[in-house]
Amino acid sequence: MAKNDVRPVIKLRSTAGTGYTYVTRKNRRNDPDRMVIRKYDPVARQHVEFREER
């Protein structure tokens, strides 16, 4: 069970308000804060910030 503690599965939700999400894993030891990544939102058809949702 230790595998899930270090690298949990997280959802990245679009800040454009489209409801589009990416699912990824992150290393909790290196990034204890919430992630913010700029990725492509196909609904908005542009690159926007995606914030971590728990």
Image (cartoon, grey):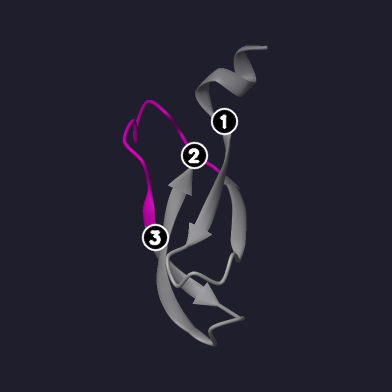
Disc 2 packing (10 Å; few <14; some 14–19; many ≥20)? some
- Return the residue nearer the eye: 19 or 4: 19
Query: In this figure, which residue is indicated by the disc labeled 3?
Result: 37
Residue 3: horizontal and vertical position, in percent? Answer: 63, 20
Q: Quadrant of residue 41?
A: bottom right
Q: Which mark is residue 53?
A: none
Q: Main secondary structure of the magenta part?
A: loop
Q: Which sits earlier in the primary sequence, circle 2 or circle 1?
A: 1
Query: In this figure, which residue is indicated by the disc labeled 2?
Result: 26
Mark 1 and mark 3: Cα distance apart in space: 17 Å
Query: Which region of the structure is painted magenta?
Result: 25-36
The residue depicted at 60 percent of the width and 58 percent of the height is 22
- Residue 52 as seen in the image, left or right of residue 44: left
In the rendered image of this protein, does residue 9 appear above or below residue 40? above
Q: Quadrant of residue 49?
A: bottom left
Query: In this figure, which residue is indicated by the disc labeled 1?
Result: 8
